[in-house]
Image (tube, helix red, strand yellow):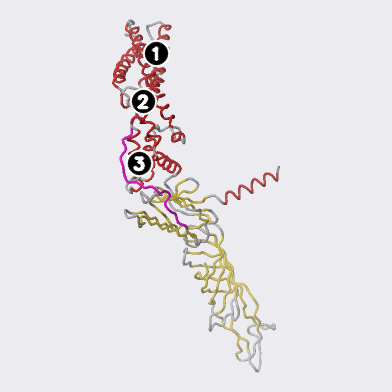
């Protein structure tokens, strides 16, 4: 059990390491950029070292656009080409509404059924009578809603067949013009063309275009016949329901419902519903369908329909956006330059959008070097020794020792303009100094200011050689020596330092 758990944990770790840490979305139409981290929008972009940065171009029209990205530090670049071979320019579309929009009254049955659930309690009439009326009313309204759905769907389908030839012309024209239109959002262009091509194939929004629509000539003919039959059957059922509602109305009219809220509601609703149904029935009689089988066969037999279906599939699978390959975060920051071009009227690609973004890289340790100046001080004071009248005397040296030093810094990356780390360094005495004659060593914390040109402020412990009296001598001892030689020793001692340096290795 434990090995399995460890294996799963390792797999999760490796999977997590490849996840996108930051998504940069550039809306080309609105010319605005948004940043997303862990599914949430953020205002300041930053990414952790080792994570992936994904750049997505929204509202990218692949028919007339191409894009290139330059990534500094990673030396990664790539370009895109146009996705399709067709283009188009603006176009209008007069799409059909449902039959409810034409007749104005369809949908009443469904609405009445939902309203009926809120009818208040009955008073005055016998409960059995009320229950019977209520049951009949609910049954009729539910049946009416089903009949209306059949009417709407079949009528819409017949109407699409009737106008399919004109819809095909509109779609062919717009495919050649809309994709070149820069004044319409590419995502809107996609929605418009998908709808127009569906109408060219006499398809509703909930229907898809299949290969059989091109190769099976009888399918469209049978589909048209079936919808005409469904429409005629639904209109007959609708007329029948109108008669049943009329009978209910006659029954209700013989009942006094002055003090009964339920019956009063049903009476008013039934009368209103009958008026609407009578208007719809009059409209049925005026509708004529003159779509012939020859028209349908012509639609399914032309090469243009094959071309439209290819465009349809291309649009259906395309998001009108482009995603560059993920960029792994390395170094201190990632500098992105996104250049988008669009084809003009002559077919030449010209500049359209340009975007530059610097993304700080956070987390992870970084090693850098710097060179600067340090001031050191020993814990114990230093002295300069000499002989005065055969007595060993001393003068105090400068308290602070200047040194030229170089450092190696270990800091964690952060999106801020400062960071804290640890440093190790080595220093040499400045020319002319007599405090220290050999190399000194430093260790301590560092405050790093800046991101590109860094300024380091370092402090901590210093290890350097200090000159001390040897041979058991002390200041004030009587000491004679013809050569003036004073025995001293140099040993490493601890002290403190403060250093200022500038980065030389990034």
Q: Residue at x 36, y 54 (%)?
A: 342
Label 2 belongs to which residue? 155
User: Is 54 on the left or on the right of 140, as rendered?
Assistant: right
Label 1 belongs to which residue? 137
Q: Earlier in the sequence, mark 1 or mark 3?
A: 1
Label 3 belongs to which residue? 172
Q: Residue at x 54, y 65 (%)?
A: 446
In the figure, 435 relative to 21: above or below?
below
Q: Where does the image place residue 384, in percent across and percent down from the top left?
A: 58, 83
User: Is 117 on the left or on the right of 19, as rendered?
Assistant: left
Magenta span of residues: 78-100
In the figure, 379 relative to 114: above or below?
below
Q: Earlier in the sequence, mark 3 or mark 2?
A: 2
Q: Residues within 10 Å of mark 1 (few under 14, many from 20)?
A: many
Please state which of residues 414 and 240 is positioned toward the viewer in this rendering: 240
- Which element is circle 3 on? helix
Q: Is residue 84 magenta?
A: yes
Q: CA distance from mark 3 to mark 2?
A: 25 Å
Secondary structure, magenta segment, majority class = loop
Q: Are dots 1 and 3 in contact, CB under 8 Å?
A: no
Q: Is residue 60 visible?
A: no
Residue 281 is marked as: none
User: Is 387 on the left or on the right of 207, as rendered?
Assistant: right
Mark in the foreground, 1 or 2: 2
Mark in the foreground, 3 or 2: 3
Please state which of residues 374 and 27 is positioned toward the viewer in this rendering: 27
Q: Where does the image place residue 42, in percent across and percent down from the top left?
A: 44, 49
Q: Quadrant of residue 143?
A: top left
In the figure, 431 relative to 155: above or below?
below
């Amino acid at each position: 059990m434990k090995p399995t758990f460890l294996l799963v944990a390792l797999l999760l770790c490796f999977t997590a390491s490849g996840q996108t840490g930051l998504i940069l979305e550039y809306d080309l139409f609105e010319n605005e950029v948004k940043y997303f981290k862990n599914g949430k929008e953020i205002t300041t972009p930053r990414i952790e070292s080792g994570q992936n940065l994904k750049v997505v171009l929204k509202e990218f029209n692949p028919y007339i656009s191409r894009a290139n990205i330059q990534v500094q530090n990673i030396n990664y670049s790539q370009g895109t080409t146009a996705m399709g071979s067709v283009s188009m320019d603006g176009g209008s579309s007069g799409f059909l509404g449902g039959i409810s929009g034409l007749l104005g009254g369809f949908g009443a049955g469904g609405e009445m059924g939902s309203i009926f659930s809120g009818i208040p309690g009955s008073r005055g009439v016998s409960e059995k009578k009320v229950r019977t009326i209520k049951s009949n009313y609910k049954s009729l309204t539910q049946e009416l809603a089903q009949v209306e759905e059949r009417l709407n769907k079949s009528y819409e389908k017949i109407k699409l067949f009737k106008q399919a030839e004109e819809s095909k012309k509109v779609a062919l024209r717009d495919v050649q013009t809309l994709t070149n239109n820069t004044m319409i959002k590419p995502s809107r262009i996609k929605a418009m063309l998908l709808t127009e091509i569906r109408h060219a194939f006499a398809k509703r929004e909930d229907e898809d275009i299949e290969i059989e629509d091109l190769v099976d000539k009888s399918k469209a003919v049978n589909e048209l016949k079936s919808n005409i039959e469904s429409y005629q059957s639904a209109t007959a059922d609708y007329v029948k329901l109108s008669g049943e509602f009329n009978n209910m109305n006659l029954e209700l009219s013989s009942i006094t419902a002055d003090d009964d809220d339920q019956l009063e509601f049903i009476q008013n609703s039934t009368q209103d519903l009958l008026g609407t149904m009578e208007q719809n029935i009059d409209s049925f009689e005026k509708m004529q369908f003159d779509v012939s089988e020859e028209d349908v066969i012509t639609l399914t037999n032309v090469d243009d329909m094959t071309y439209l279906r290819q465009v349809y599939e291309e649009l259906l699978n395309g998001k009108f956006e482009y995603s560059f390959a993920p960029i792994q975060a390395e170094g201190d920051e990632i500098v992105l330059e996104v250049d988008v071009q669009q084809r003009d009227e002559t077919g030449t690609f010209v500049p359209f959008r340009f975007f530059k973004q610097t993304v700080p890289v956070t987390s992870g340790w970084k090693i850098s070097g710097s060179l600067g100046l340090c001031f050191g001080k020993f814990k114990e004071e230093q002295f300069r020794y000499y002989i005065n009248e055969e007595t060993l005397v001393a003068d105090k040296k400068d308290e602070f020792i200047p040194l030229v030093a170089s450092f190696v810094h270990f800091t964690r990356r952060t999106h801020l303009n400062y960071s804290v780390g640890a440093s190790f360094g080595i220093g040499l005495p400045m020319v002319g100094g007599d405090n220290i004659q050999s190399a000194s060593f430093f260790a301590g914390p560092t405050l790093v200011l800046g991101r590109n040109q860094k300024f380091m402020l370092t402090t901590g412990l210093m290890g350097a050689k200090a000159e001390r009296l040897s041979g058991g001598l002390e200041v004030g001892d009587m000491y004679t020596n013809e050569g003036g030689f004073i025995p001293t020793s140099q040993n490493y001692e601890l002290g403190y330092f403060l250093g200022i340096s500038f980065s030389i290795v990034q």
